[in-house]
Image: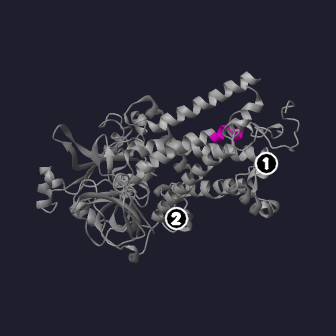
């Protein structure tokens, strides 16, 4: 008995010493979690799928993001991420110079009839205006008024094929360059978010034309997700049955860089 | 080495004192969830500080004031005549926190960041990884809470040790005095002050930190809009999430201090094997060890 307790006591001591050294060594002991495709990280990332499933189960497909009153717009929409693709994308510079005359929003991929819309055509379609809160993944929020065409209307005109499961949003702005090859921003959503009544191809912000800093000419608003799921400078909306062959296969630029695909929290 | 010698090593009991029985105090559910929480909260705290560092300012209300001021806590760095310094501003009061908050060292280099690298996982700025680890352990934390709640309801741990009863309120002043004077009572159930502490954690802090976490989710805001209403806005919820984190860290400090003061071997044993050496006069029951 005495021996048993002595050993138990030593075990406790060893455990405490182990925990202590883990703390003293600092938290770079866990820096391996930052490695993409590390098996431990892959395991932890599975929780993102659980979060997505739980939120889809708890939140009705048609549940609306809160809309605010005019008085709650207290500041301009804070620009973040790419704020001016003119600095590195010549094609986009020309579009801005010609006031987006040559701009076309394309609906392609798994649709019966691929479509193209000029900015004027989009602006002449029935629009939806909503004052919503934009939540950046960094932690800040900003309330602004967005005006645009419901994406569901464009998808209905193009007639989505039954095998389509996801919607890819392709953008003009580019990240990287220099040492690494430049990649275009893109992101994706499921069909629930694409057909959601508040998902709009916005061309207006706070009662004026959408500025370059906020994604002119068209920014897709997916109001129940974080800011990186609100793609700016969108030129093509592509219906697909999967996105494993696009980019690094995670469904978006930030998603390819370790952020969760759904972006609901 | 005898039991007697072992107990003399603890602070609370004097060697000459008679001993009470060794009782079975903590069920397997209490012990396992305790250590699961210890691990989960370690990662939740350090990844939480990583996430905070992505935008090291807290606000009151629905949105973040960029063109108006609704900030209550801001950590950052500024250039001063003496060079760059780290600052922390709380309710408009500015403190120089160079070396820890706003500006610190990372492998010999100056690092302009909210919380220092030794307090975050990963040590470098990596919001994506911080979020992956944070949400994984958030699920672990909530799952352990669900298991603990059902088990504690069934095995009466909740009723015996957590729920405050009129008698506990009556005995509270004496128990506070006993703790101040380091007179610890080792009984079957928790003392009134322990019950207050654990009731506060389980009934207030844990629900608050989970609900404020969910309130930061734009998806959950659409499904459960009442969440935003009870906390008065998404940014207020983020601030409360942070404040509850600070309170849980304070709880942890007091918790560990109490374990050390009340006899670390006995306290740790009860949270590993379930068996706990009580003060003299405690009645053993069927599940306890007969050898005392």
Name the mark on residue A247.
none
* Local crowd size for mark 2, using a 10 Å CA cut-off: few (<14), some (14–19), many (≥20): many
The residue under label 2 is B228
Where residue A157 sits: x, y (%)? 34, 54
Is A196 drawn above or below residue B265 in the view shown?
below
User: Which residue does the image show at 52% across and 49% down from the upper left?
Assistant: A56
Report the span colored magenta. B28-34
User: Which residue does the image show at 39% across and 77% down from the upper left?
Assistant: A71
> Do discs 2 and 1 belong to a common subunit?
yes
Indicate the quadrant where residue A154 lies.
Answer: bottom left
In the image, is B289 to the left or to the right of A120?
right
Q: Tell me if residue A30 can be seen.
A: yes
Q: Tell me if residue A107 can be seen.
A: no
What secondary structure is marked by label 1?
loop
The residue under label 1 is B189
Q: B250 or B36: which is nearer to us?
A: B250
**Residue lying farthest to the bottom in this orientation:** A71
Residue B181 colored magenta?
no
Chain designation of label 2: B
Chain designation of label 1: B
């Amino acid at each position: 008995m005495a021996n048993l307790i002595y050993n138990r006591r030593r075990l406790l001591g060893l455990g405490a010493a182990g925990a202590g050294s883990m703390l003293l060594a600092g938290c770079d002991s866990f820096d391996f979690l930052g490695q993409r495709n590390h098996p431990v990280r892959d395991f932890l990332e599975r929780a993102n799928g659980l979060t997505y499933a739980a939120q889809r189960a708890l939140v009705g497909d048609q549940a609306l993001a809160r809309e605010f009153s005019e008085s709650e717009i207290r500041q301009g929409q804070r620009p973040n991420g790419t704020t001016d693709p003119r600095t590195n994308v010549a094609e986009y510079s020309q579009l801005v110079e010609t006031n987006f005359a040559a701009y076309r929003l394309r609906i392609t991929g798994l649709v019966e009839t691929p479509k193209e819309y000029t900015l004027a055509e989009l602006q002449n379609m029935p629009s939806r205006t909503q004052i919503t809160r934009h939540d950046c993944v960094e932690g800040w929020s900003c309330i602004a008024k967005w005006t645009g065409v419901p994406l569901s209307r464009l998808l209905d005109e193009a007639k989505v094929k039954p095998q389509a499961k996801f919607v890819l949003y392709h953008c003009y702005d580019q990240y990287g360059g220099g040492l690494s090859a430049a990649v275009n921003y893109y992101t994706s959503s499921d069909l629930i978010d694409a057909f959601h009544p508040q998902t709009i191809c916005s061309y207006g912000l706070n009662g004026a034309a959408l500025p370059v800093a906020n994604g002119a000419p068209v920014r897709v608003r997916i109001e129940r997700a974080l800011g990186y799921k609100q793609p700016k400078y969108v030129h093509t909306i592509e219906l697909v049955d999967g996105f494993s062959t696009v980019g690094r296969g995670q469904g978006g630029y930030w998603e390819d860089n370790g952020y969760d695909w759904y972006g609901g929290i | 080495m005898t039991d007697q010698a072992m107990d003399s090593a603890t602070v609370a009991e004097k060697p000459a004192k008679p001993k009470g029985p060794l009782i079975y105090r903590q069920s397997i559910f209490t012990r396992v969830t305790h250590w699961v929480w210890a691990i989960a909260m370690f990662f939740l705290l350090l990844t939480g500080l990583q996430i905070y560092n992505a935008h090291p300012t807290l606000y009151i209300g629905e949105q973040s004031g960029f063109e108006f001021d609704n900030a209550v806590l801001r950590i950052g760095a500024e250039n001063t005549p003496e060079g760059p310094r780290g600052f922390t501003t709380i309710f408009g009061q500015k403190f120089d926190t160079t070396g820890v908050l706003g500006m610190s060292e990372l492998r010999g280099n100056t690092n302009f960041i909210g919380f220092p690298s030794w307090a975050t996982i990963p040590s470098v700025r990596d919001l994506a990884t911080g979020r992956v680890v944070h949400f994984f352990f958030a699920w672990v934390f909530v799952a352990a809470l669900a298991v603990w709640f059902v088990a504690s309801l069934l095995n009466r741990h909740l009723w015996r040790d957590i729920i405050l009863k009129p008698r506990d309120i009556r005995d509270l002043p004496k128990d506070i005095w006993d703790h101040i004077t380091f007179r610890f009572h080792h009984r079957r159930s928790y003392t009134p002050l322990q019950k207050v502490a654990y009731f506060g954690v389980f009934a207030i802090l844990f629900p608050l930190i989970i609900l404020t976490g969910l309130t930061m989710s734009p998806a959950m805001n659409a499904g459960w809009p009442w969440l935003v209403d009870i906390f008065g806005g998404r940014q207020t919820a983020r601030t409360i999430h942070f404040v509850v984190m600070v309170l849980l860290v304070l709880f942890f400090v007091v918790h560990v201090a109490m374990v050390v003061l009340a006899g670390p071997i006995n306290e740790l044993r009860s949270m590993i094997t379930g068996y706990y050496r009580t003060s003299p006069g405690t009645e053993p029951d069927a599940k306890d060890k007969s050898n005392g």
